[in-house]
Structure formats: C-alpha cells, structure tokens
Amino acid sequence: MSNHRFVRLKALVAAWLAPVLASAQGNPDWLVDTLYGSGKINTVIAVVSVILLGLAGWLFQQDRRIARMEKRIKP
C-alpha cells in the first residue's frame, strides 16, 4: 500500500511540474524583457513582499483580537 502511495505522489508531482518545465523552454516573454531587463523585478518582489507581510501581520492581529473576544465571552 505504501508503494502505491509513493507512485501516486510521484505522478502528482510530475503532473504538477510538467507545465512549468514545458513553459521554461520557450522564448522569453514580456516579463523577462521588461522587468528583468530593466532591473525592476527587485522592486516588484519588494512591493509584493511588503504587501504579503502586511496582510500576514493584519491577519495575526485579527486572530489575537478574536481570541481575546472569545475568551471574554466564555466563562
């Protein structure tokens, strides 16, 4: 049974990676030409990182607030 799961896992990973590997062999697209070529990809990565970190912090804060409210409601 364990071998069957391993084979299914390998098939799942192969199916997941196939489109990624197939697209990596084509010609460079507009993203490579514009962002990588001009060096702006670092700015894009920084902005996306700040947004994701901000969302994660906000969600953590909301979770703590809700936990405090639940603790006040329950005796």
Image (spheres, helix red, strand yellow):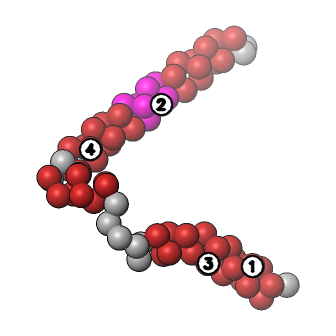
**Between disc 1 and disc 4, whose residue precedes?**
1
Instruction: State the image coordinates of residue 39 (x, y, percent, origin top left).
Output: 15, 53
Residue type for callout 4: Val
Q: In this rendering, which labeled residue sits more in front, label 2 or label 1? A: 1
Residue type for callout 2: Phe
**Between disc 2 and disc 1, whose residue precedes?**
1
Quarter residue 8 falls in: bottom right
Secondary structure, mark 4, is: helix
| Residue located beneath label 2 in the image | 60
Q: In this rendering, which labeled residue sits more in front, label 3 or label 1? A: 3
Res. 2 visible in picture: no
Q: Is residue 9 magenta?
A: no
Q: In this rendering, which labeled residue sits more in front, label 2 or label 4? A: 4
Per the model, the C-alpha gap separating discs 3 and 1 is: 10 Å
> Label 3 crowding class (10 Å Cα cut-off): few <14, some 14-19, many 20+?
few
| Residue located beneath label 4 in the image | 44
Q: Is residue 60 above or below residue 39?
A: above
Q: Are marks 2 and 3 in contact (CB under 8 Å)?
A: no
Secondary structure, mark 2, is: helix
Numbered badge on residue 8: 1
**Between disc 3 and disc 4, whose residue precedes?**
3
Q: In this view, does 40 lie above or below 66?
A: below
- Horizontally, residue 69 falls left or right of residue 38, namely right
Main SS type for the magenta part? helix
Residue type for callout 3: Ala
> Label 1 crowding class (10 Å Cα cut-off): few <14, some 14-19, many 20+?
few
